[in-house]
Image (cartoon, helix red, strand yellow):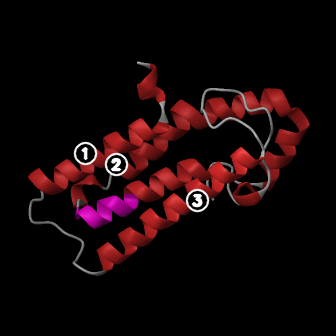
Amino acid sequence: MKWIDLPPVWLAGCIALAWGQAQYLPLGLGFGPVWADLLGGLLVGGGLVLMALAVTEMRRQKTTLMPHETPSRLVQSGIFTRSRNPIYLGDVMVLAGLILYFDAVLALPLIPVLTWILEKRFIIGEENRMRRTFRSDWARYEQKVRRWV
């Protein structure tokens, strides 16, 4: 069951639920034809860009991307100057964008659900490991940069 404890698996599950709701239980609800597709595309694109920037910066710093491993470095450069969790923020943006694109109105509660799952299953543990490993550097970084945005 280790494979289920990865953020992309949770994201994929939420996306599948949103798609299923749009396909099999639309109840005649929708966001509107043009603006939802445009905003959805912007959110998906923005989320993917955030993830790519974060992965690039973590690779450049030669530290792990795995959520349950202790990183070898505290990455404070690049996109990490704006958000402590740009990959998770990207996950939430991708889900929100696809919900808009799918016209899955009833799936909107999946956005806070995914946010809660990411925070409880991954972010809090990661931040605790970094707090123990990087001590004063982490304390300064945590004061300077917000968790999400």
Q: Please name the residue shown 17% across and 56% down the image.
A: 22
Residue depth check, mark 2 versus mark 1: number of the one nearer the observer: 1
Of 68 and 64, nearer the camera is 64
Q: Please name the residue shown 70% across and 59% down the image.
A: 79
Q: Please name the residue shown 80% across and 41% down the image.
A: 74
* Residue type of the residue flagged with mark 3: Leu
Residue 65 percent location from the top left of the image: 63, 38
Disc 2: which residue: 110
Q: Please name the residue shown 22% across and 55% down the image.
A: 106
Q: Residue furthest top?
A: 1
| Above or below, 87 relative to 72 | below
Left or right for 9, reference 144 = left
* Residue type of the residue flagged with mark 2: Leu
Q: CA distance from mark 3 to mark 2?
A: 20 Å
Q: Is residue 26 magenta?
A: no
Q: Which residues are magenta?
A: 96-103
Left or right for 94, reference 21 = right
Disc 3: which residue: 50
Disc 1: which residue: 17
Task: Report the quarter where the N terminus lies.
Answer: top left
